[in-house]
């Protein structure tokens, strides 16, 4: 194994207090890396460095910010195969998915390189005579970024890039499962021309490093993606001390299949949305709501298509579904298979542990016929497990789609313009897909949800400015 991957604090690579090992979920005998785990005092050093550097970066020119972000984005895009292979090894998504994610991270940095040049304000006439009013955007200050493991390049990119574009300094904590991806991003940022302290990487536990970021009065804003339970705690504590906070959490996204849908296309949407990336996407289609007239035909087609899916190591050509990211997540998935069984949901296909050439966390995707009140149809599992619910008609399907605590994404497969239009207006979700999988979004438009899925301003695209800037209104009397 190579050298221990270090933390990046105040422009220097620092060892931690302990050493952790990053696992390869496709091959438990071949770990990915050893990394330096920071503790709370080190996290505080990083926060202090970010705070000291905040003024310099806030005063930097748009051109300088654009140059830094373009450097980072261009390098990521140029190295997408290599970075994708690292991501596939560490998180377990298949190599094509991982390369696409690395490329996406690069595109996001390049998008925000452009946005750094387009920080606009308003100039208005005052309601009073001889006064001008200007509305401008300023950086928030120090931004703490707490990221999950399921998109170790794309999610940090869509938080770090706008934070820097709008003139903030950053302390970034990757999830414990993916320290090497976090390190790889930081390594590129360390060569981008940023002043020391503007960007800091601290690998470590949520309880120590994450908590220090939430508690510090020097942290002005916290952007978090992860579980609902942790997110609720982050929100409570951040709000209590007056920090700005943005949360992206779970989903239980419906995909409605109407009787007039192109069934082959609907099956592909469902397979992709429910099972690709091993179902570990907050936008996964985990509730598939099918109109009675085509229910049995759709389920039969799903079963046949699922039999063709190849579960295998992330780097092996031809693998459709990589391993589950961790033992803990595999155990969570298995417990939900048991719960579904105990509550009387009917297993259509899959849900078995799979043996591959290397020892890893492999399972076959599972599809259940369920009722709306069953836990398999209500709770985020975060694995390759989906529930099919039967609907009497479109109105019933829409009601089922909205009958959830979550509201991230909602999809519909239909050839009816009337139903597609109605669904776009009435689905209670932050994002709606028509004849597309619920997962798979563009990077230049807002991402986020309603209800328990999200809190605070949207991420991505121009809307990211709402979180990463604060607005000032200035009055001038001539
Ligand atoms: O999430 P956590 P985990 C869901 C999914 C998954 C479950 C657990 O159901 O099975 O969450 O995943 C940091 N203070 N999702 O354990 O714990 C942590 O170190 C500050 C859905 O990975 O929420 C990591 O960096 N930070 C989700 C980040 O929070 C803390 C994506 C997320 O970890 C902390 C990921 C604390 N006290 C998981 N405790 C989605 N829907 O996209 C932890 N962290």
Image: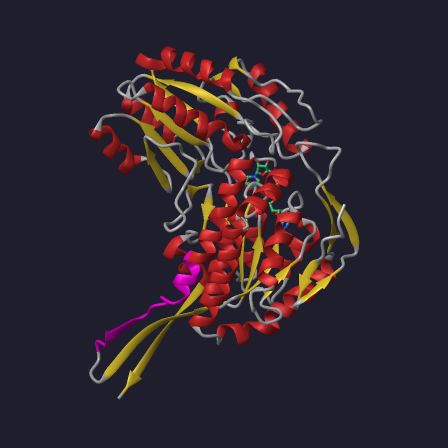
Q: Where's the C terminus, which quadrant?
A: bottom left
Q: Name the one closer to the observer, 4 or 295.
A: 4
Q: Residue furthest bottom?
A: 478
Is 115 left or right of 52, judged from the image as shown?
left
> Does 56 sit above or below residue 130?
above
Q: Residue at x 62, y 43 (%)?
A: 86
Q: Residue at x 46, y 41 (%)?
A: 453
Q: Position of residue 204 (x, y in %)?
A: 70, 51
Q: Residue at x 45, y 25 (%)?
A: 271
Colour approach in the figure: secondary structure
Q: Name the one closer to the observer, 130 or 346.
A: 346
Q: Position of residue 98 (x, y in %)?
A: 54, 40
User: Residue 286: in sight, yes or no?
Assistant: no
Q: Residue at x 67, y 61 (%)?
A: 8
Q: Ligand 1 is in which quadrant of the figure?
A: top right
> In the image, is residue 260 part of the stretch drawn in magenta?
no
In the image, which residues are magenta? 111-127
Q: Where's the N terminus, which quadrant?
A: top right
Q: Position of residue 296 (x, y in %)?
A: 38, 11
Q: Quadrant of residue 280?
A: top right
Q: Position of residue 22 (x, y in %)?
A: 71, 43
């Amino acid at each position: 194994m190579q050298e221990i991957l270090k933390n990046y604090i105040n422009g220097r690579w620092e060892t931690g207090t302990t050493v952790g090992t990053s696992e390869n979920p496709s091959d438990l005998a071949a770990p990915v890396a050893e990394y330096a785990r920071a503790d709370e005092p080190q996290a505080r050093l990083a926060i202090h460095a970010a705070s000291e550097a905040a003024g310099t970066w806030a005063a930097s020119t748009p051109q300088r910010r654009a140059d830094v972000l373009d450097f980072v984005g261009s390098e990521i895009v140029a190295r997408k195969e290599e970075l994708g292979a690292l991501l596939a090894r560490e998180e377990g998504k298949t190599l094509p998915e991982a390369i696409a994610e690395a490329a996406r991270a690069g595109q996001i940095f390049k998008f925000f390189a452009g946005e750094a040049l387009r920080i606009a304000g308003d100039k208005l006439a005052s309601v009073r005579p001889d006064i001008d009013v200007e509305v401008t955007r300023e950086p928030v200050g120090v931004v703490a970024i707490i990221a999950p493991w399921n998109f170790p390049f794309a999610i940090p990119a869509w938080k770090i890039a706008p934070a820097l574009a709008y003139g903030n300094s950053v302390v970034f904590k990757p999830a414990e499962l993916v320290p090497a991806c976090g390190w790889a991003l930081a390594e590129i940022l360390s060569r981008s021309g940023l002043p020391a302290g503007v960007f800091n990487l601290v690998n470590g536990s949520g309880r120590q490093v994450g908590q220090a970021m939430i508690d510090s009065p020097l942290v002005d804003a916290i952007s978090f993606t992860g579980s609902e339970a942790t997110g609720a705690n982050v929100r409570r504590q951040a709000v209590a001390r007056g920090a700005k906070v943005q949360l992206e959490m779970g989903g239980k996204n419906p995909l409605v299949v109407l009787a007039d849908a192109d069934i082959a296309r609907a099956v592909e949407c469902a397979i992709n949305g429910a099972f690709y990336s091993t179902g570990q996407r907050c936008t996964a289609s985990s509730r598939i709501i099918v109109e009675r007239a085509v229910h049995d035909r759709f389920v039969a087609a799903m079963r046949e298509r699922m039999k063709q899916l190849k579960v295998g190591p992330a780097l092996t050509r031809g693998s459709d579904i990589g391993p589950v990211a961790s033992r803990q997540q595999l155990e969570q998935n298995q417990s939900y298979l048991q719960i579904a069984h105990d509550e009387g949901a009917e297993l259509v296909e899959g849900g078995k542990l799979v043996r591959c050439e290397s020892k890893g966390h492999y399972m076959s995707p599972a599809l259940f016929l369920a009722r709306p009140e069953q836990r398999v149809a209500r709770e985020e599992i975060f694995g390759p497990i989906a529930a099919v619910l039967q609907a009497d008609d479109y109105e019933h399907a829409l009601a089922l789609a909205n009958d959830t605590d979550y509201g991230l994404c909602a999809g519909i497969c239909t050839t009816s313009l009337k139903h597609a239009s109605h669904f776009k207006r009435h689905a209670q979700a932050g994002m709606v897909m028509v004849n597309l999988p619920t997962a798979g979004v563009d990077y230049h438009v807002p991402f986020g949800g309603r209800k328990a899925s999200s809190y605070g301003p949207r991420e991505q695209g121009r809307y990211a400015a709402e979180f990463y800037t604060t607005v000032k209104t200035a009055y001038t009397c001539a």
